[in-house]
Every structure is written in C-alpha cells, then in structure tokens.
Image (cartoon, helix red, strand yellow):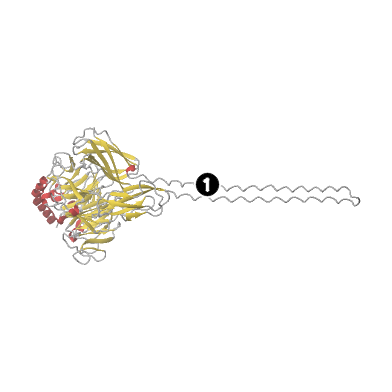
C-alpha cells in the first residue's frame, strides 16, 4: 500500500509540472468570480515550480506562520522546508544537501537544490506539514519516516520522536544525534504515515495519524497523551484523517476525514462531539450533522458539501476553514459547524485554485492558501465590515438608559456589543438600548459579522450619563405668633367725703394708670431654603480605547525606495498576542507600501518592527495602521498619518 501511494503521488507530480508552471507564469492577480464571494479578495501569490529557493517540486505541503509573520511550507517532493518573509519573498530553504548536495543538513539562501531523502537526523522523506510552536520551534510531520521532527527557529535540528527512532526498538523514543526511521504501528505515540500537524494555545501538539485513521495529541515536548478515532464511517471514525487544528480558547479539536468527505469535532480530551457534511446523518442529499449515528458523507460541490477535504484551520472567533481540494475552493463554517461561505477564485484564465491542500488564517483575518498543483501560496484578503455608532456620543445625556443605533458597510451584517465593565460581548440589535446605568462615563464597543462570517474590528464610543438633578430643599417652618400682653390693673376708687356741712367736694380719686401693653412677640424668622443637593460625582473613567493601547514611533520617512527597510517601534500597554502593521500611501486607492507582523508583545513593552518597502508611494503622505489582537483576545486597531519627506 505504501509503494502504491508513493507511485500515485509521483504520477500526480509529473502530470502537474507543466500545467503548474504555465499557470504560475501566467498568473498576475486573482479575481473572485461571484459577487457572493466579493468580501474575500485575492491580494498576491508567491512560490513557483522548481528546486530553487522558495520553489516547490510540484506539490506543496501544509503551512504555518510564526510570531513574526514568516511563512513555513514543506516541499513534499523536494524533501525540504521553505521559509518566506511576511511579504512573500523567499528567506531560506533547509534540508539535507539543499546547498551543494552534500550528505548533511544545510540551509541555502540563494542557489538551492532538492533535498536528499532519507531517515538520518534532520533528513526528510516527503515531509507533508509544518507548524510553529509558541516558542518558535518548528515541528514537521515526516510522512514516510513515520515520525515527527523538531527544528529551532534558526533551522537547526533539535530532535525526532516516534517509535524506534533511536535504535529500532518497539517503544516510543526521542533521538537528538543519531536517528533512524520510526517503526509504523498502532500503539500510542506510534505513527503510520502522519500527514497533518498543529500546535494549540497551550503548546499541545496534534497529529493527523493518517494511515492509522486517528488523531493523536502530544504534550509540548512531544510525549504522547492520547489518541482518538478508528477506521470506519461511524461517529468518531476516519477513512484517512488528513489534517488537524485546535480551536483557540476552547482547546477543542477539528480534523478532516478525507475519504468520508466530512470533518469531525472532538473535545479537548478526545471525546467525539459531532461530524459535519452532506448526508452524514441519514444519507439525505443535504448538509447534516451527526453525534451518535453517523455515516459516510456524500461527495459533491453543493453549499457546504466537501470533496476529499484536506487542510483545516480555525480563526480566533471559532470559524472553521476547510481546503475543499476536489472543488477547488475553501469552505467556511460557523463556530457550530454550519456552512457560511465558499471562497474560490475564478476559472483557470483568472488564476483559479488547482487542488488547494491547506489554508491558514492570519491574525488580521486574511487567508493563506496552499494552491498545491500550481506550486504557489495565495494570499486572500478579508474585507471586514466597518461599524458606525449613532446616539448620544457627542454630548452628555440625562437618560440612564440611552439608545444607540449601528450601521455596517456590509448591509447583511449582524452585531454584537458590550458595555465595558458592565456586560460581556453578546448579540444585539441594530437599535440597542442599554440597561440602567449609573452616572458617569461609559464605553460601548460594537463589532459586526457579515453574511460570510467575516468579523470586523471593534468600534467604540464613549458617552456620559449625567447625575439626576437634586431634590429642592424643604421650606422653613413659620415663626410662632408673639403672646398678647397682660391687661393693666384697675385704679382704686377715692374715699367718700364726711357728712356735715357741705364741705368742698372731695377730690376725685385718680384714675389708675392704664396697664402697659405687653411687648409684642418677635416675628418668627423665615425658615432657610434647603441647600441644593451636591452634584453626583463623575463616574470612573472608562478603560482606554483600542487606539489608546497602542503607540507607534516612526522614523522620519524620507524618500522611500522599493527594498528599503522602515524601522518602527511599537509599544502596547495592554499586550498584543498577534497583529499586522501596514504602511499605505496617501493616494485615494491607498496603495500598500510595506507590511510587518507583530506577535507576542508583552504589556508595557515595546518592540522594533521592520517593514520592507514593496511598492513606490504615489503621494507625499503615508498611512500607518495596526490591526492586532490584544492579550485578552479583543481585536484592536490604530492608525496615524505621516509625511514622506
């Protein structure tokens, strides 16, 4: 069986050489054929047929990208590995004898040749896949040697692992100096022609153990942990496990089931969850999912239908991308494994795919596709929906439940939003009313997802909720009325005169002095007006927006020439997991001048980033922008304008 497989592969290589070479020479740019795919736009390609640096001997293997944006791709029939810069220029090629044909591991940077196949330390025999670990080491699926190999970021051989790689013993071994081919078999840690490989967020290594019809998961050092799957068409079974990928954040595992025309999903510990494809539940000619009773999928080209699927990748939002080899396209599935888009260039006259075997999702959502029979790698840009926010964002509002409206450049977009520090991201309508908010400054963040599952950058709006006006003070009590004065005492009557002769009339008694009026009581003082309530304190300042978390220090951009290097220093207060920095000229079309990748930038640290100029600017200004993913997983954006002197 092994000899038959290799012969068929060689036949395909011979048949495809001439057509592949012609297609590469004729290729100028890709055009997406149907309007349904207009949100994915081909950008450029790199690689060609041959044995020189950056070339492929008829069939490229699986891809990966390191923290700096460099691309690694195995040259299956060249028995070597190609490394490209983020801009697509070839950086180097390594393998046995690639410089001068000598028996030993070599690195070439200009004149290169095909590698020498074999089983010695660092020697490859139809290596089918490469993946880059968080520490920068490169793991290779050494297909016909039934083992894995590990190389340093500088392309130096570190180790090989598999059964019997040291001395042929029937046990799992690791060799570092003297090595031999692994012993194929079905024990844990034993491989039979492995073809796919991936590294998860936690450093675990996943392997598509193809001819054992299973997947295996190893720890960060390459020691086996568990295997999942067996031969068949039922739940959790494979008919040639072709590729594997970890889901960011959850640690779940997805793997393509090549001859069953479907892909499977497993838990982080290897428990089967479901299979997705046409007819996988009961044979109906339609897309289905199965969890307990499953059967072989129906091969075809319908929406979400697969034909001999190969490579698989998962983006930061959980969307799954499958290289649908026989249908010359990439099929995109939602996080719950339902089809949302088919991504395919036009026909051959426009440079369409010929048996795409792998796909990689870049930090900014763009794709790299291994167009294997054309011996090249194609970059496809994702046109993200841009969100605008309307509402009380320009002036304070007294409404404690303000209403906002959202619009996106892609009309069919859906929205998710959050109030920073109050709610988490969740689906929300285009007209959104917040929950009850305390007085103070708040931040609303919104992102849009278009009909093809492209998730845009986060748009943010700061707004201020005013404190309610204070209640008026209570009026003072009226003063009490003064008491009436006591009445004056009556005067005494005079004594009567003695009888006798009439004497002079007695003097009238004096009237008693009138009583003094009581002093009037003091008028009660008016009560003081109640003091105005103190205004509510301003709430805590919201966290800095995405742009505030990034700083880019530019040099003085003088006359920019093609091939020149622009060195910039990027600083992040929140930390960057991954991102891309682009420099475009200020012309209306915003021509791309240079691009550089950013990976694993710690909080409050800065890093020098070098971008190589790829095109001559058409204006005297440049737009420098950064699209990245913070350490907490949120996507951020930043831009500034610079003058080219």
Out of 164 and 271, give the one closest to the viewer: 271
Out of 388 and 447, give the one closest to the viewer: 388
Q: Residue 399's x, y, as percent?
A: 40, 52
Residue at 25% in and 39% down: 623
Q: Which residue is mark 1?
A: 531
Q: Can residue 121 be spotted in the picture?
A: no
Out of 16 and 458, give the one closest to the viewer: 458
Out of 32 and 486, give the one closest to the viewer: 486
Above or below: residue 91 compared with residue 203: above
| Image position of 147 (left or right of 605) | left
Q: Residue 257's x, y, as percent?
A: 20, 59
In the rendered image, which quarter is residue 291 located in? bottom left
Q: Residues within 10 Å of mark 1 (few under 14, many from 20)?
A: few
Q: Can residue 18 be spotted in the picture?
A: yes
Above or below: residue 281 compared with residue 79: below
Q: Residue 516's x, y, as percent?
A: 72, 47
Q: Residue 490's x, y, as percent?
A: 77, 51
Residue that lies at the very extreme toward the right in this rendered image: 500
In the rendered image, which quarter is residue 265 located in? bottom left
Judged from the image, the secondary structure of the residue bearing numbered disc 1 is: loop
Tell me the quadrant of the picture where the N terminus can be found: bottom left
| Image position of 324 (left or right of 523) | left
In the rendered image, which quarter is residue 598 located in? top left
């Amino acid at each position: 069986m092994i000899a038959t497989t290799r012969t068929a592969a060689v036949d395909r290589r011979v048949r495809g050489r001439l057509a592949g070479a012609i297609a590469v020479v004729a290729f100028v740019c890709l055009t997406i054929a149907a309007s349904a795919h207009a949100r994915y736009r081909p950008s450029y390609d790199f690689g060609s047929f041959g044995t020189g640096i950056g070339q492929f001997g008829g069939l490229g293997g699986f891809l990966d990208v390191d923290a700096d944006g460099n691309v690694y791709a195995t040259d299956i029939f060249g028995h070597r590995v190609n490394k490209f810069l983020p801009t697509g220029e070839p950086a180097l090629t390594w393998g046995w004898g690639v410089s001068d044909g000598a028996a030993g591991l070599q690195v070439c940077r200009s004149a290169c040749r095909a590698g020498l196949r074999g089983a010695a330390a660092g020697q490859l025999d139809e290596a089918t896949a490469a993946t880059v670990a968080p520490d920068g080491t490169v793991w290779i699926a050494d297909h016909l040697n039934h083992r894995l190999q590990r190389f340093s970021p500088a392309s130096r051989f570190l180790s090989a692992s598999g059964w019997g790689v040291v001395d042929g013993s029937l046990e799992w071994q690791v060799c570092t100096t003297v090595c031999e081919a692994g012993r194929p078999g079905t024990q844990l840690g034993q491989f039979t022609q492995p073809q796919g490989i991936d590294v998860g967020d936690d450093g675990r290594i996943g392997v598509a153990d193809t001819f054992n019809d299973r997947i295996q998961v190893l720890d960060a050092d390459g020691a086996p942990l568990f295997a999942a799957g067996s031969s068949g068409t039922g739940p959790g079974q494979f008919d040639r496990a072709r590729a594997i990928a970890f889901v960011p954040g959850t640690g779940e595992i997805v793997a393509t089931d090549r001859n069953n025309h479907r892909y499977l999903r497993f838990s982080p510990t290897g428990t089967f969850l479901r299979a997705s494809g046409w007819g996988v539940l009961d044979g109906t000619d339609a897309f289905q999912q199965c969890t307990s009773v499953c059967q072989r999928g129906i091969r075809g080209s319908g929406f979400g239908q697969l034909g001999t699927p190969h490579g698989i990748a998962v983006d930061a939002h959980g969307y799954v991308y499958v290289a649908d080899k026989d249908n010359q396209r990439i099929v995109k599935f939602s996080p719950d494994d339902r089809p949302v888009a088919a991504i395919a260039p036009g026909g051959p006259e426009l440079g369409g795919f010929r048996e795409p075997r792998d796909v990689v999702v870049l930090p900014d959502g763009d794709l790299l596709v291994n167009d294997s029979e054309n011996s090249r790698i194609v970059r496809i840009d994702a046109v993200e929906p841009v969100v605008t926010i309307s509402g009380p964002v320009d002036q304070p509002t007294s409404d404690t439940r303000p209403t906002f409206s959202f619009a996106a450049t892609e009309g069919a977009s859906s929205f998710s939003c959050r109030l920073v520090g109050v709610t988490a991201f969740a689906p929300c309508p285009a007209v959104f009313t917040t929950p009850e908010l305390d007085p103070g400054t708040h931040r609303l963040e919104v992102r849009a997802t278009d009909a093809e599952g492209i998730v845009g950058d986060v748009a943010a709006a700061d707004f201020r909720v005013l404190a309610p006006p204070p209640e008026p003070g209570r009026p003072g009590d009226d003063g009490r009325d003064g008491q009436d004065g006591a009445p004056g005492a009556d005067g005494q009557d005079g004594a009567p005169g003695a009888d006798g002769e009439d004497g002079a009339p007695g003097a009238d008694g004096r009237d008693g002095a009138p009583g003094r009026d009581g002093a009037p009581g003091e008028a009660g003082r008016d009560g003081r007006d109640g003091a105005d309530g103190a205004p509510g304190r301003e709430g805590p300042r919201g966290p800095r927006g995405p742009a505030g978390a990034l700083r880019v220090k530019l040099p003085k951009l003088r006359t920019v020439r093609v091939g020149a290097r622009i060195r910039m220093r990027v600083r992040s207060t929140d930390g960057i997991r991954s991102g891309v920095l682009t420099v475009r000229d200020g012309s209306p079309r915003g021509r791309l001048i240079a691009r550089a990748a950013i990976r694993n930038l710690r909080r409050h640290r800065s890093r020098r980033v070098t971008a190589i100029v790829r095109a001559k600017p058409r204006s005297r200004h440049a737009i420098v922008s950064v699209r990245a993913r913070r350490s907490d997983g949120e996507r951020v954006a930043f831009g500034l304008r610079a003058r080219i002197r």
